[in-house]
Image: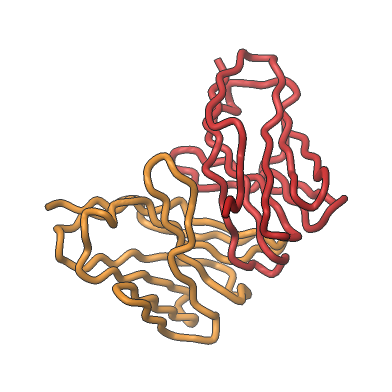
Protein backbone atom coordinates (compact mmCIF):
# COMPACT_ATOMS: atom_id res chain seq x y z
CA UNK A 1 0.00 0.00 0.00
CA UNK A 2 2.57 2.57 -1.22
CA UNK A 3 0.37 5.66 -1.86
CA UNK A 4 2.63 8.44 -3.13
CA UNK A 5 6.32 7.65 -3.53
CA UNK A 6 8.98 10.30 -4.04
CA UNK A 7 12.64 9.86 -4.90
CA UNK A 8 15.21 10.82 -3.80
CA UNK A 9 14.62 11.62 -0.13
CA UNK A 10 17.68 13.86 0.13
CA UNK A 11 19.82 15.64 -2.45
CA UNK A 12 22.62 18.19 -2.44
CA UNK A 13 23.29 20.08 -5.66
CA UNK A 14 25.80 22.68 -6.69
CA UNK A 15 24.48 25.91 -8.16
CA UNK A 16 23.82 25.42 -11.86
CA UNK A 17 23.38 21.64 -11.73
CA UNK A 18 20.19 20.02 -12.91
CA UNK A 19 18.12 17.24 -11.46
CA UNK A 20 14.72 15.58 -11.67
CA UNK A 21 12.55 14.72 -8.70
CA UNK A 22 10.42 11.67 -9.30
CA UNK A 23 6.92 11.02 -8.02
CA UNK A 24 4.58 8.08 -8.53
CA UNK A 25 1.16 7.26 -7.11
CA UNK A 26 -0.70 3.97 -7.16
CA UNK A 27 -4.19 5.23 -6.25
CA UNK A 28 -5.37 5.86 -9.82
CA UNK A 29 -5.72 9.57 -9.07
CA UNK A 30 -6.24 12.04 -11.88
CA UNK A 31 -4.65 15.07 -10.23
CA UNK A 32 -1.06 15.43 -9.10
CA UNK A 33 0.79 18.34 -7.54
CA UNK A 34 4.23 19.60 -6.63
CA UNK A 35 4.59 21.82 -3.58
CA UNK A 36 7.57 23.34 -1.87
CA UNK A 37 7.71 23.90 1.86
CA UNK A 38 9.88 26.63 3.34
CA UNK A 39 10.13 27.71 6.99
CA UNK A 40 7.40 30.20 7.86
CA UNK A 41 5.93 30.00 4.33
CA UNK A 42 3.73 26.94 4.53
CA UNK A 43 3.30 24.94 1.32
CA UNK A 44 3.27 26.71 -2.01
CA UNK A 45 2.09 25.14 -5.24
CA UNK A 46 4.75 24.92 -7.97
CA UNK A 47 2.92 23.03 -10.73
CA UNK A 48 -0.03 20.76 -10.98
CA UNK A 49 -1.52 18.30 -13.42
CA UNK A 50 -5.27 17.81 -13.56
CA UNK A 51 -4.99 14.77 -15.83
CA UNK A 52 -2.55 12.78 -17.90
CA UNK A 53 -1.05 14.98 -20.58
CA UNK A 54 -1.89 18.34 -18.95
CA UNK A 55 0.17 20.55 -16.68
CA UNK A 56 -0.37 24.07 -15.32
CA UNK A 57 1.62 26.60 -13.36
CA UNK A 58 0.96 27.17 -9.71
CA UNK A 59 2.02 29.99 -7.42
CA UNK A 60 5.82 29.64 -7.76
CA UNK A 61 6.69 27.96 -11.11
CA UNK A 62 9.81 29.92 -12.07
CA UNK A 63 12.93 27.77 -12.36
CA UNK A 64 10.99 24.51 -12.63
CA UNK A 65 9.55 22.28 -15.32
CA UNK A 66 7.28 19.28 -14.99
CA UNK A 67 6.26 16.23 -16.96
CA UNK A 68 3.16 14.12 -16.47
CA UNK A 69 4.64 10.97 -17.98
CA UNK A 70 1.49 8.89 -17.51
CA UNK A 71 -1.33 8.72 -15.00
CA UNK A 72 0.97 7.39 -12.28
CA UNK A 73 4.04 9.60 -12.62
CA UNK A 74 4.65 13.32 -12.31
CA UNK A 75 8.24 14.57 -12.31
CA UNK A 76 9.71 17.94 -11.36
CA UNK A 77 12.88 19.19 -13.04
CA UNK A 78 15.29 21.88 -11.98
CA UNK A 79 17.29 22.84 -15.07
CA UNK A 80 19.82 25.11 -13.35
CA UNK A 81 19.57 24.90 -9.58
CA UNK A 82 19.86 28.05 -7.48
CA UNK A 83 20.32 28.43 -3.69
CA UNK A 84 16.79 29.92 -3.54
CA UNK A 85 15.50 26.48 -4.53
CA UNK A 86 16.78 24.95 -1.31
CA UNK A 87 13.58 23.58 0.16
CA UNK A 88 11.56 20.49 0.98
CA UNK A 89 9.55 19.35 -2.01
CA UNK A 90 6.32 17.41 -1.69
CA UNK A 91 4.42 15.57 -4.35
CA UNK A 92 0.71 15.00 -3.79
CA UNK A 93 -2.19 13.41 -5.62
CA UNK A 94 -5.94 13.61 -5.36
CA UNK A 95 -8.93 11.98 -6.97
CA UNK A 96 -10.21 15.06 -8.76
CA UNK A 97 -9.85 18.82 -9.03
CA UNK A 98 -12.51 19.90 -6.58
CA UNK A 99 -10.26 20.37 -3.58
CA UNK A 100 -10.53 16.71 -2.69
CA UNK A 101 -8.36 15.13 -0.05
CA UNK A 102 -4.72 15.15 -1.13
CA UNK A 103 -2.29 12.37 -0.32
CA UNK A 104 1.33 13.37 0.16
CA UNK A 105 4.67 11.75 -0.42
CA UNK A 106 7.35 11.81 2.27
CA UNK A 107 9.17 14.72 0.73
CA UNK A 108 12.56 15.44 -0.87
CA UNK A 109 14.93 17.63 1.10
CA UNK A 110 16.99 19.54 -1.47
CA UNK A 111 19.97 21.71 -0.64
CA UNK A 112 21.61 23.87 -3.31
CA UNK A 113 25.07 25.13 -2.41
CA UNK B 1 -6.28 35.14 -4.14
CA UNK B 2 -7.19 32.95 -1.22
CA UNK B 3 -5.39 33.71 2.02
CA UNK B 4 -5.29 31.32 4.96
CA UNK B 5 -3.93 32.51 8.29
CA UNK B 6 -2.85 30.56 11.35
CA UNK B 7 -0.87 31.38 14.44
CA UNK B 8 2.59 29.83 14.22
CA UNK B 9 3.00 28.30 17.68
CA UNK B 10 0.91 26.74 20.45
CA UNK B 11 2.19 25.18 23.66
CA UNK B 12 0.03 23.12 26.01
CA UNK B 13 0.48 20.69 28.87
CA UNK B 14 -0.25 17.00 28.45
CA UNK B 15 -3.88 16.27 29.27
CA UNK B 16 -5.08 19.78 28.44
CA UNK B 17 -7.16 20.68 25.39
CA UNK B 18 -5.49 22.33 22.40
CA UNK B 19 -7.32 24.74 20.12
CA UNK B 20 -5.75 25.65 16.80
CA UNK B 21 -7.39 28.48 14.88
CA UNK B 22 -7.50 29.36 11.21
CA UNK B 23 -9.05 32.27 9.31
CA UNK B 24 -9.52 32.48 5.56
CA UNK B 25 -10.66 34.97 2.97
CA UNK B 26 -12.48 32.89 0.33
CA UNK B 27 -15.44 30.77 1.43
CA UNK B 28 -16.14 28.90 -1.82
CA UNK B 29 -14.29 25.73 -0.83
CA UNK B 30 -16.56 22.68 -0.53
CA UNK B 31 -14.38 21.08 2.10
CA UNK B 32 -12.02 22.49 4.71
CA UNK B 33 -9.20 20.34 5.98
CA UNK B 34 -6.79 19.87 8.83
CA UNK B 35 -3.50 18.18 8.03
CA UNK B 36 -0.85 16.99 10.47
CA UNK B 37 2.88 16.93 9.74
CA UNK B 38 5.22 15.06 12.06
CA UNK B 39 8.95 15.84 11.98
CA UNK B 40 10.63 14.68 8.79
CA UNK B 41 7.40 13.37 7.30
CA UNK B 42 4.84 14.39 4.73
CA UNK B 43 1.40 15.75 5.50
CA UNK B 44 -1.39 13.43 6.54
CA UNK B 45 -5.06 14.27 6.52
CA UNK B 46 -6.29 14.51 10.09
CA UNK B 47 -9.91 15.45 9.55
CA UNK B 48 -12.12 17.59 7.35
CA UNK B 49 -15.48 19.33 7.46
CA UNK B 50 -18.02 19.87 4.74
CA UNK B 51 -18.70 23.57 4.19
CA UNK B 52 -22.40 23.33 5.09
CA UNK B 53 -21.62 21.91 8.53
CA UNK B 54 -20.92 23.85 11.72
CA UNK B 55 -19.24 21.12 13.70
CA UNK B 56 -17.70 17.72 13.26
CA UNK B 57 -16.51 15.45 16.05
CA UNK B 58 -14.11 12.59 15.48
CA UNK B 59 -12.90 10.91 18.69
CA UNK B 60 -10.60 13.46 20.39
CA UNK B 61 -10.92 15.92 17.52
CA UNK B 62 -13.60 18.59 17.16
CA UNK B 63 -13.74 20.86 14.14
CA UNK B 64 -15.77 24.05 14.33
CA UNK B 65 -16.63 26.13 11.28
CA UNK B 66 -18.01 29.65 11.45
CA UNK B 67 -18.70 30.60 7.85
CA UNK B 68 -19.93 34.06 8.72
CA UNK B 69 -16.61 34.93 10.37
CA UNK B 70 -14.60 32.70 8.00
CA UNK B 71 -13.07 30.94 10.97
CA UNK B 72 -12.11 27.29 11.33
CA UNK B 73 -10.80 25.68 14.49
CA UNK B 74 -9.45 22.32 15.56
CA UNK B 75 -9.79 21.21 19.16
CA UNK B 76 -7.77 18.27 20.41
CA UNK B 77 -9.04 16.92 23.71
CA UNK B 78 -6.70 15.30 26.25
CA UNK B 79 -3.63 16.34 24.26
CA UNK B 80 -0.78 13.81 24.34
CA UNK B 81 2.93 14.17 23.61
CA UNK B 82 2.33 12.20 20.42
CA UNK B 83 0.15 15.06 19.21
CA UNK B 84 3.23 17.30 18.95
CA UNK B 85 3.43 18.23 15.28
CA UNK B 86 2.68 21.00 12.82
CA UNK B 87 -1.00 21.38 11.97
CA UNK B 88 -2.07 22.91 8.67
CA UNK B 89 -5.44 24.34 7.81
CA UNK B 90 -6.25 23.91 4.09
CA UNK B 91 -9.00 24.93 1.67
CA UNK B 92 -9.71 24.04 -1.92
CA UNK B 93 -8.18 26.49 -4.40
CA UNK B 94 -9.38 27.61 -7.82
CA UNK B 95 -6.78 25.42 -9.54
CA UNK B 96 -8.09 22.27 -7.86
CA UNK B 97 -5.20 22.31 -5.46
CA UNK B 98 -5.26 22.88 -1.72
CA UNK B 99 -4.25 26.23 -0.27
CA UNK B 100 -2.48 25.87 3.04
CA UNK B 101 -1.95 28.10 6.00
CA UNK B 102 1.62 28.45 7.23
CA UNK B 103 1.05 25.82 9.91
CA UNK B 104 0.79 25.88 13.70
CA UNK B 105 3.52 24.09 15.61
CA UNK B 106 1.95 22.37 18.60
CA UNK B 107 4.29 21.57 21.48
CA UNK B 108 2.98 19.34 24.24
CA UNK B 109 4.81 19.46 27.56
CA UNK B 110 4.64 16.54 29.98
**B43 or B73, which lies in front?**
B43
Q: Is residue B95 above or below residue B48?
A: above
Colouring used for the render: by chain
Q: Is residue A35 above or below residue B46?
A: above
Q: Position of residue A34 (x, y in %)?
A: 66, 45
Residue A5 relative to residue B80: left or right: right
Q: Residue at x 71, y 20 (%)?
A: A18
Q: Is residue B34 left or right of residue A91?
A: left
**Nearer-the-camera pick, A108 or B93:** A108
Which residue occupies 66% across, 55% down? A93
Which quadrant of the view contains residue B46? bottom left
Q: Considering depth in this image, is A39 or B87 the residue closer to the camera?
A: B87
Whole-percent x, y for residue B74 in the image: 36, 69
Q: Residue B81, position in %: x, y?
A: 21, 54
For the colour orange, the matching chain is B
Tell me if residue B29 comes above or below residue B52 in the rendering.
above
In this view, the residue farthest toward the right is A53
On the image, the x and y values in percent for residue B66 come to: 44, 80
**Residue at 70% over, 62% down:** B96
User: Residue reaching furthest left?
Assistant: B110
Q: Color of chain A here?
A: red
Q: Nearer the viewer, residue A14 or A71?
A: A71
Give the tally of numbered discs. Answer: 0
Q: In the drawing, does residue B54 fall left or right of residue A85?
A: left
Quarter of the figure with residue B94: bottom right
Residue in the image at 70% along x and 53% along y: A32
On the image, which quarter does residue A83 sit in?
Answer: top right
Q: Which quarter of the figure is the N terminus of chain B placed in?
A: bottom right
Amino acid sequence: NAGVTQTPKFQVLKTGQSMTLQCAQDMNHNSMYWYRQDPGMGLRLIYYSASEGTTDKGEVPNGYNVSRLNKREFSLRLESAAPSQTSVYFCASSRDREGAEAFFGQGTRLTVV
Amino acid sequence: GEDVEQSLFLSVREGDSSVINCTYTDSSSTYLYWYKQEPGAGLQLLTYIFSNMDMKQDQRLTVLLNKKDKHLSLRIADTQTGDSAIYFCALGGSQGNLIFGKGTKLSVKP
